[in-house]
C-alpha cells in the first residue's frame, strides 16, 4: 500500500516559505471569510458565494495579485483560487480585504485533489493556469501539471463553452500545452492562427511573468474552448 510508485504525482514542492506578519494575520483573520477547507464532498458554489454568477478558477495563483485584481475589476463574476503555498494565500487575503472583495474564495490545497473532490462537474466558466512550474529537467517533466489526465479533469468541471486559459514563459512547456490540449477532443483552440493567443491586455504581469521577462524569456498564451457535448 505504501509502495512509492503508487503515490500520485505532485506538481509542487511545499516550500517552508517565511510568512510575513501581515500574511499570518490575514490568513487567521480572513480565513472564515475567504478560505475553503478541504473536504471530500462537493462544494455548493451558489451557497458559497450567495449567488449564481459566472465563475473563474485560478490554479496556482502564487501571491494572488492577478486573482485579486480580477475579482476587483469584475464584481459581476465569482473567483475561486487554489494555491498550496501558504504565504501566497495569506497575501491574497490581505489584498481581498483591502479591496473589500466579496466575490473571491480560496483553498490552500493540491488543485488536483480539490478539483477531483470538491468541484462538481459542469460548474466552471473559466479556468486559468498562469506560469505553472515548468519543471525544466527532463526527469521532472512528469511533475508538470498540463498532462492529459489533468486536462480531462479540468474539462469535466467546466461548462460547455467555457474557456481554459494558460500562459508560460518556457517555450518547450508551451509546445507541450499546445500538443496536450490540441489532442484533446474536449477542447478547441481559440487561437485564430491555430497556436498562440495575443497576450491579454487586461493581465497585469504576474510575479513569474515579470521574473521570466527579467531573464529574457518570451511569453506564450493559449486559450481553449470547452466543446459542447456531442
Ligand atoms: C511558478 S508559480 C506561478 C505563480 C503565479 N501564477 C505567477 O504567475 O506568478 C506556480 C505556482 O503554482 C503552485 N502550484 C503548483 N502545483 C499546484 C497544485 N497542484 N495545486 C495548487 N497549487 C499548485 C505553486 O505553489 C506556485 O505558487
Image (cartoon, grey):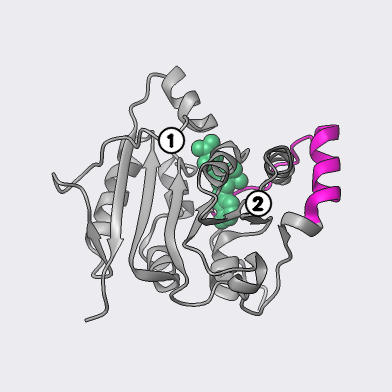
- Identify which residue, 90 or 147, lies in the foreground: 90
Q: Which residue is mark 2?
A: 84
Residue interval drawn in magenta: 11-31
Residue 97, percent from left and from top: 73, 43
Q: Which residue is mark 1?
A: 203
Disc 2 to disc 1, how far (Cα)?
A: 22 Å
Q: Is residue 198 above or below residue 127?
A: above
Q: Crowding near pointer 2: few (<14 within 10 Å), some, many (20+)?
A: many
- Identify which residue, 12 or 154, lies in the foreground: 154
Res 8 visible = no
Identify the element where label 2 is drawn. loop
Residue 61, percent from left and from top: 56, 45
Is residue 98 rendered to the left or right of residue 220?
Answer: right
Q: Which mark is residue 215?
A: none
Q: Quadrant of the C terminus?
A: bottom left
Identify the element where label 1 is drawn. loop
The residue depicted at 67 percent of the width and 73 percent of the height is 2
The reply to whether the magenta stretch includes residue 27 is yes
The residue depicted at 30 percent of the width and 46 percent of the height is 222
Q: Quadrant of the N terminus?
A: bottom right
The residue depicted at 70 percent of the width and 42 percent of the height is 15
Residue 183, percent from left and from top: 22, 62
The residue depicted at 61 percent of the width and 55 percent of the height is 103
* CB at disc 2 and ligand 1 closer than 8 Å: yes
Amino acid at each position: 500500500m505504501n509502495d512509492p510508485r503508487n503515490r500520485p504525482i505532485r506538481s509542487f514542492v511545499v516550500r517552508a516559505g517565511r510568512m510575513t506578519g501581515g500574511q499570518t494575520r490575514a490568513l487567521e483573520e480572513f480565513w472564515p471569510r475567504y478560505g475553503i477547507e478541504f473536504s471530500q464532498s462537493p462544494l455548493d458554489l451558489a451557497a458559497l458565494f450567495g449567488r449564481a454568477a459566472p465563475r473563474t478558477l485560478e490554479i496556482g495563483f502564487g501571491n494572488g495579485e492577478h486573482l485579486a485584481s480580477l475579482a476587483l475589476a469584475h464584481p459581476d463574476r465569482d473567483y475561486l483560487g487554489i494555491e498550496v503555498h501558504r504565504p501566497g494565500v495569506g497575501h491574497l487575503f490581505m489584498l481581498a480585504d483591502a479591496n473589500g472583495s466579496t466575490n473571491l474564495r480560496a483553498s490552500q490545497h493540491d488543485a488536483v485533489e480539490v478539483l477531483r473532490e470538491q468541484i462538481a462537474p459542469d460548474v466552471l466558466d473559466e479556468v486559468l493556469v498562469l506560469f505553472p512550474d515548468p519543471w525544466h529537467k527532463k526527469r521532472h517533466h512528469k511533475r508538470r501539471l498540463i498532462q492529459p489526465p489533468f486536462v480531462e479533469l479540468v474539462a469535466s468541471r467546466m461548462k460547455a463553452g467555457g474557456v481554459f486559459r494558460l500562459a508560460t514563459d518556457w517555450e518547450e512547456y508551451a509546445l507541450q500545452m499546445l500538443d496536450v490540449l490540441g489532442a484533446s477532443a474536449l477542447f478547441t483552440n481559440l487561437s485564430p492562427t491555430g497556436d498562440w493567443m495575443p497576450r491579454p491586455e487586461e493581465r497585469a504581469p504576474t510575479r513569474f511573468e515579470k521574473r521570466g521577462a527579467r531573464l529574457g524569456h518570451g511569453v506564450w498564451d493559449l486559450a481553449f474552448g470547452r466543446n459542447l457535448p456531442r
